[in-house]
């Protein structure tokens, strides 16, 4: 069992003819069942061609019709990425994973608003995220596959590198992962912590969860309050940015303390009050999780 993706997921790469799209599609194909999972690419100017045996189609709709794909991953440059997301949503895919960083916020607001207004079924992960992996089955995105190990711990994070850090610690302690989900650090994105926590809570093969947040916004607090009332499994939490100065953007577009809200300390206090085991030291995430189960 897994959340979002498994070895039966069929994936389209949007941006497969670019250097980044080609590199990561190749890496994903080489991981676990990737050869069977990555079935199509999209580039209107190169329809009819192929990339290392993967057929390229003119549109997502066409690729879905011809291959039965139900997910896509986007490596399209920032100015065209929102349109690429919408194309995948319009094709009624189950999941769209957008890796692209630097999409104009206004573009994302328009896409998210349209998805809501039209009650679209597509789940959006990202943008500006490392993707999602179900160890030993499939990885969609840019995470290093070799650090992951199949197991029963869920990981959800706004930070790509901290996702890898948590996974690395868990694997070293002999604790594998059911799925690891990077939700991305942009202020306007798809899945939030609360959405992924719901999925892990409902997943019979996830026993506990590591939840990693950052300064800025209130998504972590919202998730913590939901966890307090609903979560049946232990959760360990970490927030990046304890020493971040207010008003200065730290790395991600969404990582900014504004109006005195969204500080790491504030988030940690709410999380702790909601029964989450928290730490200010990222090197302790794995150890705390092991102690909690």
Image: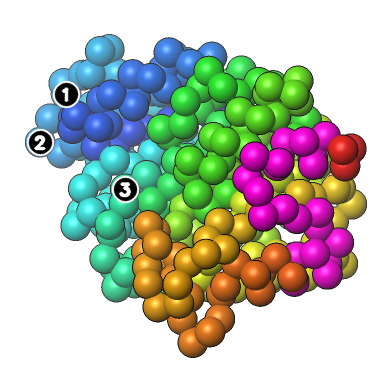
Q: Residue furthest front?
A: 243
Residue 124 % position (x, y): 48, 53
Few, some or many C-alpha atoms within 10 Å of disc 1 (few <14, some 14-19, many ≥20)?
few
Few, some or many C-alpha atoms within 10 Å of disc 2 (few <14, some 14-19, many ≥20)?
few
Residue occupied by mark 2: 45
Between the C-alphas of marks 3 and 1, the distance is 25 Å
Residue bounds of the magenta highlight: 270-290
Name the image quarter holding the N terminus.
Answer: top right
Q: Is residue 241 left or right of residue 289?
A: left
User: Residue at the spot x=31%, y=51% of the render?
Assistant: 101
Q: Secondary structure at mark 2?
A: helix
For residue 48, which numbered disc appears in the image? 1
Name the image quarter holding the C terminus.
Answer: top right
For residue 92, which numbered disc appears in the image? none
Between the C-alphas of marks 2 and 3, the distance is 21 Å
Q: Is residue 281 magenta?
A: yes
Residue 56: quadrant of the picture: top left
User: Residue at the spot x=83%, y=34% of the render?
Assistant: 290
User: Residue at the spot x=46%, y=31% of the render?
Assistant: 143
For residue 14, above or below residue 108: above
Q: Circles 3 and 1: CB distance less than 8 Å?
A: no
Q: Residue furthest bottom?
A: 259
Residue 181 % position (x, y): 58, 42
Q: Is residue 285 magenta?
A: yes
Residue occupied by mark 3: 100
Q: Quick check: can you spot residue 134?
A: no
Q: Earlier in the sequence, mark 2 or mark 3?
A: 2
Q: Circles 2 and 3: CB distance less than 8 Å?
A: no
Q: Is residue 273 left or right of residue 21?
A: right
Residue 192: quadrant of the picture: bottom right
Number of the front mark, 3 or 1: 3
Residue 228 % position (x, y): 85, 65
């Amino acid at each position: 069992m897994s959340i979002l993706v498994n070895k039966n997921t069929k994936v389209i790469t949007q941006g497969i003819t670019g250097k980044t799209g080609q590199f990561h599609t190749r890496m994903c194909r080489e991981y676990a069942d990737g050869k069977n999972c990555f079935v199509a690419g999209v580039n209107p100017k190169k329809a009819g061609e192929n990339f290392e045996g993967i057929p390229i189609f003119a549109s997502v709709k066409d690729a879905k019709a011809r291959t039965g794909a139900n997910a896509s991953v986007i490596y399209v440059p920032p100015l065209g990425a929102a349109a690429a997301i919408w194309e995948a949503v319009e094709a009624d895919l189950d999941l769209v994973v957008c890796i692209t960083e630097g999409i104009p916020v206004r573009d994302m607001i328009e896409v998210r608003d349209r998805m809501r207004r039209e009650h679209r079924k597509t789940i959006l992960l990202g943008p500006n995220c490392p993707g999602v992996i179900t160890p030993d089955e499939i990885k969609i995105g840019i995470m290093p596959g070799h650090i992951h190990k199949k197991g029963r711990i869920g990981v959800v994070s706004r930070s790509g590198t901290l996702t890898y850090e948590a996974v690395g610690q868990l694997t070293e302690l002999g604790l594998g992962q059911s799925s690891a989900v990077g939700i991305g650090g942009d202020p306007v994105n798809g899945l939030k912590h609360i959405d992924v926590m719901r999925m892990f809570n409902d997943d019979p093969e996830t026993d506990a969860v590591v939840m990693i947040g950052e300064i800025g916004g209130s998504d972590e607090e919202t998730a913590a309050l939901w966890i307090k009332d609903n979560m049946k499994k232990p959760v360990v939490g970490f927030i990046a940015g304890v020493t971040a100065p207010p008003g200065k953007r730290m790395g991600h577009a969404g990582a900014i303390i504004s109006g005195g809200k969204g500080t790491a300390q504030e988030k940690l206090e709410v999380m702790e009050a909601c029964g989450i085991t928290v730490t200010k030291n990222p090197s302790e995430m794995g150890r705390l999780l092991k102690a909690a189960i």
